[in-house]
Image: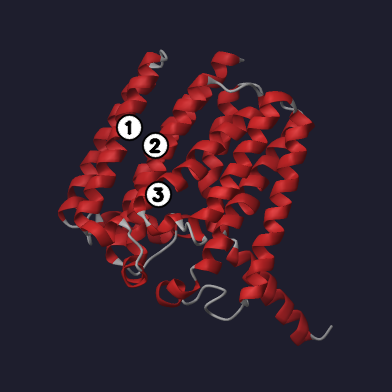
Amino acid sequence: MSAAARTGLIDKVKAHIELLDPVTWISVFPCLAGGVMASGAMQPTVHDYLLLFALFFLYGPLGTGFSQSVNDYYDLELDRVNEPTRPIPSGRLSEKEAIWNWSIVLVLASLLSTWIGMHIGGQRGIVFVGSLLAGLVVGYLYSAPPFKLKKNIFFSGPAVGFSYGFITWLSANALFSDIRPEVIWLGGLNCFMAIALIIMNDFKSKEGDAKGGMKSLTVLIGSKNTFLVAFVIIDLVFSVFSWITWNWGFHILSMFILAALAVNVFIQFPLYRDPKTGVKFMQHAVDDGFGNAIGKSDVQEHKAFLRFQVANNLLFLTNQMFAAAFVGAKYM
């Protein structure tokens, strides 16, 4: 193979991987880890570590990658405006190659989840396979016509919350044990947190959404009111989180969650007052600390959201990991 052919092949592989959007895989990993911890049943054996690796591979590169690939394929015209450097609008991948991309990933995800479900067996196996397949279906309907759930915020937010924030906890729990009631609560809280974050993430595509007829909340009510709606949901999530952990007997953790809520509210005020430049002191954390993990943006409101996301996710996910660990210890 000539040097030019090798370079072309490498560039093509890179474009296929980029279409699966590796940055987004990270979003499901904390939920998967929490579900495993809360089960309290994973053992330090080669068998269980292999299952854990398969779980992360299934929901990261395959499951999340599938939804991102489908999204890019059906959002080609929008991406010509919002993200022209993506693999398809930039011409690095053809539309036919994109179809092959998400079709192969879909088949691999379905086969792997079925094998795992048969391996663990029983009701747990049904829950595991059913959750993953439901996530794949929702991931497709989110972007594909005629449903295209993302066109309306009243469907897009719940779809993302269900796929990224709920079934991940459920599947991870089912992989190692019967479903713990606490996992339903923790997964539900993650679902609503994801809804709030996806509402604000739409800031980055406000211009393209308006032109393409997408009814994002930002298009419907403006940036300032979008921040307000998202903050109300987030603060309610923290409040319910504190209440349920108190009822579970985790009193010290409940107090820490209330403290995290207070910090969040302190950050939210300047963002609401100035949606474009609020909490600018945290921009360094986005640019140099978490930029590769949460992305970057040229839209001022979206930059502000990314600054908030750094603090919010650290506060929420840290407390959720502690809650999962305490729940798991209860069932050990």
Please provide percent x and percent y for residue 266: 21, 41
How far, Cα to Cα, is label 2 from label 3?
A: 24 Å
Residue 227 appears in the rendering: yes
Instruction: Single out the mark in the foreground, 1 or 3.
Output: 3
Residue ID at (34%, 28%): 257
When asked about the image quadrant of residue 175, the answer is top right
User: Which residue is the extreme one toward the front?
Assistant: 146
Q: Are marks 2 and 1 in contact (CB under 8 Å)?
A: yes
How many other residues sit within 10 Å of disc 3, few (<14), some (14-19) or many (≥20)? some
How many other residues sit within 10 Å of disc 1, few (<14), some (14-19) or many (≥20)? many
Task: Work out whether mark 1 precedes mark 3 in sequence or the reverse, and give the earlier one.
Answer: 3
Q: Which residue is mark 2?
A: 316
Please provide percent x and percent y for residue 72: 53, 66
Task: Work out whether mark 2 precedes mark 3 in sequence or the reverse, and give the earlier one.
Answer: 3
Above or below 273: residue 124: above
Q: Which residue is mark 3?
A: 155
- In the image: residue 204, left or right of residue 90: left
Numbered tag placed on residue 238 in the rendering? 1
Residue ID at (36%, 66%): 205
Residue ID at (68%, 57%): 105
When asked about the image quadrant of residue 201, the answer is bottom left
Q: Identify the element where label 2 is drawn.
A: helix
Instruction: Single out the mark in the foreground, 2 or 1.
Output: 1
Image colouring: secondary structure
How far, Cα to Cα, is label 1 from label 3?
A: 23 Å
Looking at numbered disc 3 in the image, what kind of residue is underneath it? Phe
Residue 83 appears in the rendering: no
Please provide percent x and percent y for residue 329: 56, 17
